[in-house]
Image (cartoon, rainbow, N blue to C red):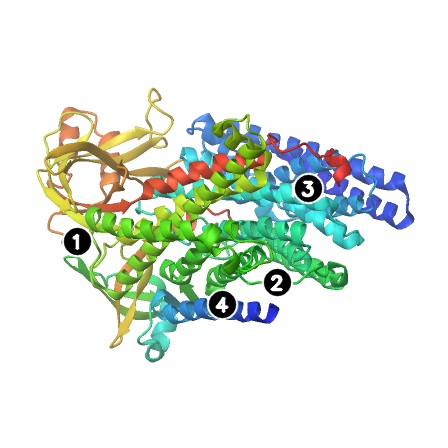
Amino acid sequence: MNTKFIALLIIIGLSLGGIAYFSSKETSFLLLDASELAASSSQYTDQNLRVRGFVQVGSLVREGKKARFTLELNEKAIPVFFTGDTLLPDAFKEGARARVDGKLENGVLVASHVEAKCASKYEAGYAEEK
Amino acid sequence: MNNLGTILLASSLAVLFFSIIQTTYGLLKGDRKGIELGRLALMTNPAIICLTFLVLLTQLMRSDYSNYYVVMHSSEHLPLFYKMTSIWSGSSGSLLFWNLILNVFTFIVLWQTRKSIQDRIPIMNIILAVLSGFFSFLAVFYSDAQPFREFQPQAVAGRGLNPLLQHWAMIIHPPILYIGYVSISIPFAIAMSALVSGQLSEDWMKFIRKWTLFSWFFLGTGILLGSKWAYEELGWGGYWAWDPVENASLMPWLLTSAFVHSVVIQERRGMLKFWNMILVILAFHFSLLGTWITRSGVLEGPHSFSKSTIGTPFISYIILSFLFFTGFVIYRRKSLNPERNLEAITSKEGSFLLNNFLLVLSTAAILLGVFSPLLYGKEFKAPWFNSWGVPAGIFLLLLMGSAPLLAWKKGAGSVFFTTLLKPFFAGVFGAGAYILFYSHAFIKPSAGYGDVLSEIYSVLTVGIGIFTLAGIFQEYYRGTKARKEQNPEESFPVAAYNLLIKNKRRYGGYLVHFSLVLIFIGYAGNAFKQNTSIKFYYELSPPTSEEVVYSSIDKGILGGYQIEATTLKIKPVLISGIGTTPNIQNVIVSQEGTFTIYRGNTKEADLVTERRFYPQISHLTGDFETHIPTSEPAILSFAKEDFYIQLGAIEKADMSSENPDLPLMFMNYYFTGNSQAEKLSLYLQFPKEIVANLEIWINPLVKLIWIGSGLYFLTGLFLLLPVGEKKTKKVEVVI
């Protein structure tokens, strides 16, 4: 009976694990810094990316709900096209710290969702000082 | 005051150190007096920690800006109540709070065992002393856990309490959750004392079952309260986001749920002794891990504090302690052998085992999801957790429904016709009725693959839920009938009541199942959730008061609802209530949209939703720094669904450039300009035309979640309170 039971556990475990594994491609983000993405952009095509960086000053062009800007970190930058499917947050400004969710297409990060923190607030935060 | 607090913390560490040495010495030499002295020292520590807590509380209430913690987490403009609750809004304060609760429980358990002469009690004392000592150690040596750091020179203003935490549920949610987290330490210490001393007889089992039930109850209540808060305060239309901090509290709850079930198997069938030890160890360390996740800030989430110095010592303690006690379980494995083996998969034991397996597997999967950003740079979104969590949950629901109906030792075949058949038909019938109901009442999602799957899950959940409810009803009915046959003088309701009171563990447990089924059916409504965002066009009205008023005649439609925009005001709200003089430190700028909701031709309500901008004050200069936005959704609740709206971003009408900073403009308008003409010119600087985004959700069956949550609280309380069941011998004798 114990072997039968263990076999049952394995079947349940494998099927749930299988669901989790196969859905993970669509339901997870690869976390990257803008500099990492800019350095080797070719290997990150066709994946969900969540890229951190700063909105380069002077790069932001709004076209209605859509927007184009450059995300930079450590002097390396990647161009971003924002599709306008969601709203850009209030804190989204040039120079702000941003987290961009999207996919890389022809060297441009096509993003549907952007989160931002204005630089001063990020530093103040709720955190205790180091 | 700072010095007093620091000295108290240091003396707590010294007292605990003394207690550990004394108890160890007493154990090694077999010296009763040494052990007794160690115990008394440990019993003094709660008083010291209480005093420390009071010192910090006093500083917060007096807004003593010479204390770093007070400066960072409170402000003189807060109402007294929030000044006090900010004691658990920051890292060091909440670690002190952890220590306080631990010491209260330690005191209780030491009192309960004061007459016990069992050899395992001193070991329990050591385990508790080490744990509390660790927290005092952090508070003395690590800056992020020190609540009494001096702020020099004294700050001019406090940074205030995180506005998200200024909500009634946030006042009681953290303490309740913390009580849940911390109280696991007690059953853990008792079980480990038995393990380490090798006294593995079963007489302490009942005692740790009660304590585990206690923390299971508080964890569950805390989690459900947290959901309620998220739903009413965060303004994103949901109640559970699989956020790291939510997961941190869910994991120990799942493990304690597993434990309260598997302990029944140990008591009844003598199986799972090894497993139960592992579960207690896991539950305790996951509760520590939860505190670590919340307080070390290693994982970025909305609640997390930024990276802090306590991360490394804390995780080291967790890992070392886990390895030590797991090692002991393996060392003692021979005395933990099962008395019997499993005889049938579909027996009661079998279903309990499966339930344990699923709960622990889910915990492991959540753990993987929580740590994946650290482990391999990937972040899993909520749909990933749902992808395996929903089928696992449905399976658990099936077990919840069937386990009470199955027989010990025998397979399901033997009881199918006597107990399972009627609930089974009820479930099938219920699922059918649900399909009819929702295709009538809710709008079906588009026929994408994922939507069809979630529709199937939804029907399965409701069907199995009704199967479970029918099973519970049948159990009650049979139990009551059997009782009435034995006691013919009792009327039916009296017999039902006595049945519940006299067999609280069994029938009270069914009531908890009942509340969980309601919650699950509420979750199933998510398959028919609708969400959209509508833009409304507003024009600036002429000035009439100090409020800036925009008005609109736009309409929008979602589902059967029509939404009519009327006004949008930008206005001041005082943090500490009406009557105080407004200044830049205590004025919240509120964007308040009013919408009239129609269903068909009948007007249902005027809903008011806000975005509030709390001032962040610099603690160094007392000047305004920036605004922190929060959401105030409006919810129109019906029996079948909630209509939920939240005002979103406000744009310029041509959407050409970045959104106007209306809160800042309002501050300017409100605080400057002395003459009428100046005010008017400032008023006219506001954009003439704006577009406001309104996020709208229709959330079916949400009400069942809150009803189920309330019931969970009540039934859990009923299980814990010492009503009913024959009084066993006094607890002191039991352990």
Label 2 chain ID: B
User: Compared with residue B433, is residue B577 higher up or lower down, i.e. above or below?
Assistant: above
- The quadrant of the picture occupied by the N terminus of chain B is top right
Task: Count residues near mark 4 (Cα–Cα under 10 Å), then give few for <14, some for 14-19, many for 20+.
Answer: some
| Near-viewer residue (B92 or B502) | B502
Give the distance between the C-alpha atoms of the residues marked 4 and 3, in whole angstroms. 33 Å
**Residue B644 position in % (x across, y down):** 26, 42
Asked if both marks, 4 and 2, belong to the same chain, the answer given is no
**Residue B207 numbered mark, or none:** 3
**Residue B464 position in % (x across, y down):** 39, 53
Q: Are marks 2 and 3 in contact (CB under 8 Å)?
A: no
- The residue beneath circle 4 is A13
Q: Are marks 4 and 3 in contact (CB under 8 Å)?
A: no
Asked if both marks, 1 and 2, belong to the same chain, the answer given is yes
| Near-viewer residue (B472 or B148) | B472
**Residue B343 numbered mark, or none:** 2
Label 1 chain ID: B
| Near-viewer residue (B341 or B573) | B341
User: Compared with residue B353, is residue B56 higher up or lower down, i.e. above or below?
Assistant: above
- The quadrant of the picture occupied by the C terminus of chain B is top right
- The residue beneath circle 1 is B657
Mark 2 or mark 3: whose residue is earlier in sequence: 3
**Residue B455 position in % (x across, y down):** 29, 57
Looking at the picture, which amino acid does disc 2 mark?
A: Glu
Give the distance between the C-alpha atoms of the residues marked 4 and 1, in whole angstroms. 52 Å
Asked if both marks, 4 and 1, belong to the same chain, the answer given is no
Task: Count residues near mark 3 (Cα–Cα under 10 Å), then give few for <14, some for 14-19, many for 20+.
Answer: some
Mark 1 or mark 3: whose residue is earlier in sequence: 3
